[in-house]
């Protein structure tokens, strides 16, 4: 029988499973409670962007996704224009096309292999907390209700989060009026190239191939966007819209699922209430443009995982767990803003909107402009506040060769990585690495990198400032920490 968990994660979607894998691999007892009795094949999220792949690669999980996904290095913009992910400095120069249920399968396997306990058919019906932990009432598959307790609880239970409601956090925002058509099916007459998009006055169709020869088909049909989202979508409806916009019948058949959906833009007021935290769609939800919801949720999990570990192991410096909300809230707010603009750009049908789309498709062919926009889409420009860490603090650290391998491989055990200096008394929490080539031009010689691959501190040499940074991020040295517990 599994030990009582130190952390209960509610929700076995990508965010909850990624967090469970983070915690379990760090030796933290973790249970994942999932209301569903089995994983659904209907999944709106279908892409993994380069930065998310990099973060999962830090823990050695990217390979499993590559086995089930199909790299798309040149996703379509429309009107014969394609993006070139090869312009980016990343080991993953593509958008990985992968159904969400496949992503969940890979993350669940990683979590269970590390020791996390996944419990399907278990629903949280109430929770209470005090200064030492969180108690939840859960209803099991047999209908009986029991109480369980953990040090912390993380709500990753989606837009209609029970956890968020239980702690009284507002979820402000709005619903869009327009409905969008989406589905996975086979095509007898697929477009060429297989990843294809076309924009006309009638609307837009985008087609993306999965590895199993099914296709994700996304349709913005201006003649049907006012239809109710709960109106059933037939294969003939999909076919008619695609033919009208593409000008050719792609002959969809054998649908896995078909749906109309109406998106919303909502953001939780807080991500932490005492020992209860929110992540993923429970904290923020928006339209699925560019698959940014999935990216943001998994990135929440990677940011939160090592901070929860530090709290539970007892070495976290003051304010570390609070920095989860301080860092991730602005990222989600900016993502909400950008996806809203993207949706309006994609669905507006006035003369002005069509002119803007035409201009954008021309400008994107300029490599310098495309590289900048792609870096944003791929998540490579996301950064956190600098604090006292210098000009390089908060930046993403790209993968580089190091003595003995790659820099990203140095993060496999979830520790900090110190480049160009000795970790000394912090060696239990900090791994040392020596670069073969610089991180970037003018980057300082000594760099302390957080377990999530962002710079904590950088300076020209080891000295008192490095010691201060180690204490600020990693807590007291191991010797002093051990003597304090005696």
Image: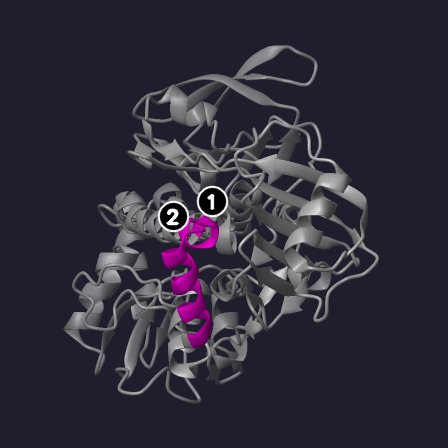
Q: Which residue does the image show at 66% across and 24% down from the upper left?
A: 121
Q: Are marks 2 and 1 in contact (CB under 8 Å)?
A: yes
Q: Nearer the viewer, residue 399 or 196?
A: 196
Mark 1 element type: loop
**Split into 4 quadrants, where in the image is the N terminus?**
top right
Check disc 2 and report the residue beneath it: 340
- Classify 10 Å Cα crowding around label 2: few (below 14), some (14-19), many (20 and above): some
How has the structure been colored for display? Answer: one colour
Q: What secondary structure predominates along the stretch shown in magenta?
A: helix
Mark 2 or 1, nearer chain start: 1
**Residue 144 among those drawn in magenta:** no
Q: Left of 173 or right of it: where is 110? A: right
Circle 1 residue: 287
Q: Where in the figure is residue 10, as x and y percent of width and height?
A: 51, 31
**What separation in Å lies between label 2 and label 1 (alpha carbons)?**
7 Å
Which residue occupies 51% across, 49% down?
294
**Residue 372 relative to residue 326: left or right:** right
Magenta part of the protein: which range?
343-362
| Residue 297 vertical position relative to residue 155 in the rendered view, above or below | below
- SS at badge 2: helix
């Amino acid at each position: 029988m599994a030990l009582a968990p130190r952390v209960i994660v509610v929700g076995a979607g990508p965010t909850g499973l990624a967090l469970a894998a983070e915690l379990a691999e760090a030796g933290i007892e973790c249970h994942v409670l999932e209301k569903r009795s089995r994983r659904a094949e209907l999944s709106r999220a279908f892409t993994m962007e380069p930065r998310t792949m990099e973060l999962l690669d830090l823990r050695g999980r990217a390979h499993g996704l590559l086995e089930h996904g199909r790299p798309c290095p040149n996703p379509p913009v429309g009107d014969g224009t394609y993006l070139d992910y090869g312009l980016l400095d990343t080991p993953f120069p593509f958008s990985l096309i992968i159904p969400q249920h496949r992503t969940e399968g890979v993350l669940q396997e990683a979590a269970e292999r590390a020791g996390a306990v996944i419990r399907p058919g278990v629903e949280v019906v109430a929770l209470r907390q005090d200064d030492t932990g969180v108690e939840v009432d859960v209803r099991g598959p047999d209908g009986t209700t029991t109480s369980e307790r953990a040090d912390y609880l993380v709500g990753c239970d989606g837009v209609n989060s029970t956890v968020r409601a239980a702690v009284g956090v507002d979820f402000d925002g709005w619903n869009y009026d327009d409905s969008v058509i989406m589905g996975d099916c086979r095509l007898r007459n697929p477009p060429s190239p297989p990843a294809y998009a076309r924009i006309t006055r009638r609307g837009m169709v985008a087609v993306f191939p999965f590895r199993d020869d099914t296709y994700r088909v996304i349709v913005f049909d201006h003649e049907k966007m006012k239809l109710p989202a709960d109106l059933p979508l037939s294969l003939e409806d999909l076919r008619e819209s695609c033919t009208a916009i593409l000008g050719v019948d792609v002959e969809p058949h054998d649908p896995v699922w078909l749906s109309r959906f109406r998106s919303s833009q909502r953001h939780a007021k807080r991500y932490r209430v005492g020992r209860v935290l929110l992540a993923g769609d429970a904290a923020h939800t928006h339209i699925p443009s560019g698959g940014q919801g999935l990216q943001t949720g998994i990135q929440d999990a990677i940011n939160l995982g090592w901070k929860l570990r530090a709290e539970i192991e007892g070495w976290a410096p003051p304010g570390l767990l609070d920095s989860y909300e301080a860092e991730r809230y602005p990222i989600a707010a900016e993502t909400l803003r950008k996806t809203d603009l993207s949706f309006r750009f994609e669905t507006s049908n006035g003369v002005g909107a069509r002119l803007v789309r035409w201009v954008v498709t021309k400008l994107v062919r300029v490599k310098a402009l495309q590289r900048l926009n792609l870096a944003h889409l791929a998540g490579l420009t996301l950064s956190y506040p600098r604090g006292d860490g210098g000009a390089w603090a908060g930046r993403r650290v790209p993968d580089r060769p190091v003595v003995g391998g790659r820099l990203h491989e140095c993060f496999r055990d979830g520790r900090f990585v110190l480049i160009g200096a000795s970790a000394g008394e912090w060696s239990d929490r900090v791994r040392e690495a020596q670069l073969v080539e610089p991180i970037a031009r003018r980057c300082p010689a000594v760099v302390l990198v957080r377990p999530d691959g962002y710079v904590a501190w950088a300076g020209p040499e080891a000295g008192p400032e490095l010691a201060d940074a180690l204490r600020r991020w990693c807590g007291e040295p191991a010797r002093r920490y051990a003597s304090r517990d005696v």
